Amino acid sequence: MTGKGGAHFSRCGLLLALLALTSCARAPSFDILGSFFPAWLICLVVAMVLTALTGWLLRLLHIPIAVPTLTYLSLTALFTFALWLVFFGS
């Protein structure tokens, strides 16, 4: 293959090689009672607890929530990503 077809083939091959090598790094995990759990799972569990505490605080302060499902899902995502960045971000 020569010309544009060869360059396209080379780019696709390079892209596939890069995608295959992205998972070679060691993933952060915790050893809990002999079982390894991914760090994102720990961040998610802590975020769910923080979301429940935030919901309790909002009810205690009588702050109305317009769309509770969206609010609690967004709070959980916010806490999960924030915890991940604080503890595992570089």
Image: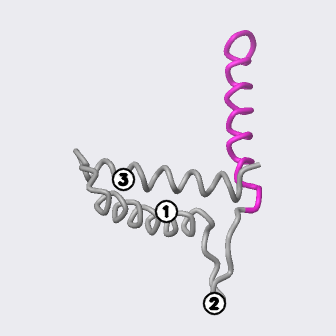
Q: Residue furthest bottom?
A: 33
Mark 3 element type:
helix
> Can you say which quadrant of the picture contains the N terminus?
top right
Where's residue 5, x and y in %? 67, 16
Q: Is residue 8 magenta?
A: yes
Where's residue 50, x and y in %? 47, 64
Mark 1 element type:
helix
Q: Which residue is mark 1?
A: 47
Query: Is the C-beta separation of discs 2 and 3 under 8 Å?
Result: no
Tell which circle, 1 or 2, labels the residue nearer the N-terminal end.
2
Identify the residue at horizontal 63%, vertical 66% (top origin). Answer: 39
- Closer to the observer: label 2 or label 3? 3
Identify the residue at horizontal 51%, vertical 55% (top origin). Answer: 79
Tell which circle, 1 or 3, labels the residue nearer the N-terminal end.
1
Q: Count residues near mark 2 (Cα–Cα under 10 Å), then give few for <14, some for 14-19, many for 20+.
A: few
Q: Is residue 56 left or right of residue 33?
A: left
- Closer to the observer: label 1 or label 2? 1
Q: Which residues are magenta?
A: 1-26
Q: Amino acid at mark 3?
A: Leu
Q: Residue furthest front?
A: 61
Any mark on residue 73, and which? 3
